[in-house]
Image: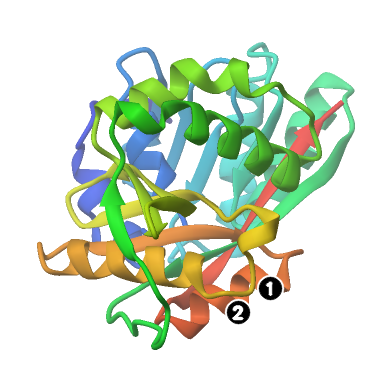
Amino acid sequence: MFVNFEPDDRVLHSKAFLQEEVEYNLIHLITGNPESLRLKTAEDELIFAHTEGYNPWLWISPEVDAVQRRALVKQLGERVKELGLSGVTGAPETARLFAEAYCENTGKLYHVHMIMEAYHCPQVQKPSNVSGKLLQADAGYIPVIADYLACFVKDAFGTDNAPENFLGYARDITGSGTLRLWMVQDRPVSMANLAHLSSRYARINEVFTPHDCRKQGYASAAVAELCAELLGKGITPMLYADAANPDSNKVYQSIGFERTGSVADLRFQ
């Protein structure tokens, strides 16, 4: 029923998957990891992608009917019941079906950790009258970036971490050239990271503005400028936004991001 597949398999370019590629963009990152577990059906109707220590992502073709969908999920739950999964991520109904099957097999419970809205930006709308310019961060900004990352994690997940814990990651994303800073009078006032590139999309994350610089349009300007750069290369920007944060959703919509669907992050306990 389930077979292993290689990165860039045909299923990732199938018509059915392309219909929901924005919502399931992170599957490209997971399947590109040589250590990941990559399962699909021979008919390319299902993808299960898992990196140890993280939630697996589960996609089922929208062309699969409800009866077959439940049957596939039940069989998959039996197949992976020994993996000790922390949760599952996918379209809300798909994730719920799998969670119920997995918990039935393991005796665990599940809860909704987060609902994310998936967006893509086919055409950017730059905000007007925002001072500053976008800069590719260099090593001189690593301490500032580490501090912003610590604040970003606290805002997003409610967890306190010392900036020193993010120095290594700040060096990595600075060295790779993916981190952008919005600069006003030589001061970084917002940041955005180009997290991952696939053949058709670029995923943006870690968008952050310190509290004393908010409500000035800096994050909008930074993301819009990065989107313009990507669109100029023929790559469509996309991102995930927490459904519980209406302000960030409005910001992205105001610069041209269009919602394509929702993704549920469920956790087992």
Q: Residues within 10 Å of mark 2 (few under 14, many from 20)?
A: few
Looking at the image, which residue is at 46% across and 15% down?
168
- Name the element at disc 2: helix
Give the camera-side residue of 227 and 104: 227
Q: Is residue 73 in sight in this rendering? A: yes
Quadrant in the picture for the C terminus: top right
* Kind of residue at badge 2: Lys
> In the figure, is residue 234 to the left or right of 119?
left
> Tag on residue 95?
none
The quarter holding residue 3 reads: top left
> In the figure, is residue 185 to the left or right of 244?
left
Residue 25: give x, y in percent of width and height: 39, 50
The quarter holding residue 32 reads: top left
Looking at the image, which residue is at 42% across and 40% down?
47
Q: Is residue 58 above or below residue 78?
A: below
**Label 1 with label 2: CB-CB less than 8 Å:** yes
Q: Which residue is mark 1?
A: 247
Residue 211: give x, y in percent of width and height: 70, 56
Quadrant in the picture for the N terminus: top left
Looking at the image, which residue is at 12% across and 68% down?
232
Q: Which residue is mark 2?
A: 250
Residue 204: give x, y in percent of width and height: 40, 53
Q: How many marks?
A: 2
- Among all residues in the image, which is located at the extreme left? 233
Give the camera-side residue of 200 and 88: 200
* Kind of residue at badge 1: Asp
Residue 255: give x, y in percent of width and height: 42, 80
Give the camera-side residue of 188 and 60: 188
Q: Is residue 122 above or below residue 206?
A: below
Distance between the Cα atoms at labels 1 and 2?
5 Å
Q: Is residue 2 in sight in this rendering? A: no
Looking at the image, which residue is at 45% across and 58% down?
239
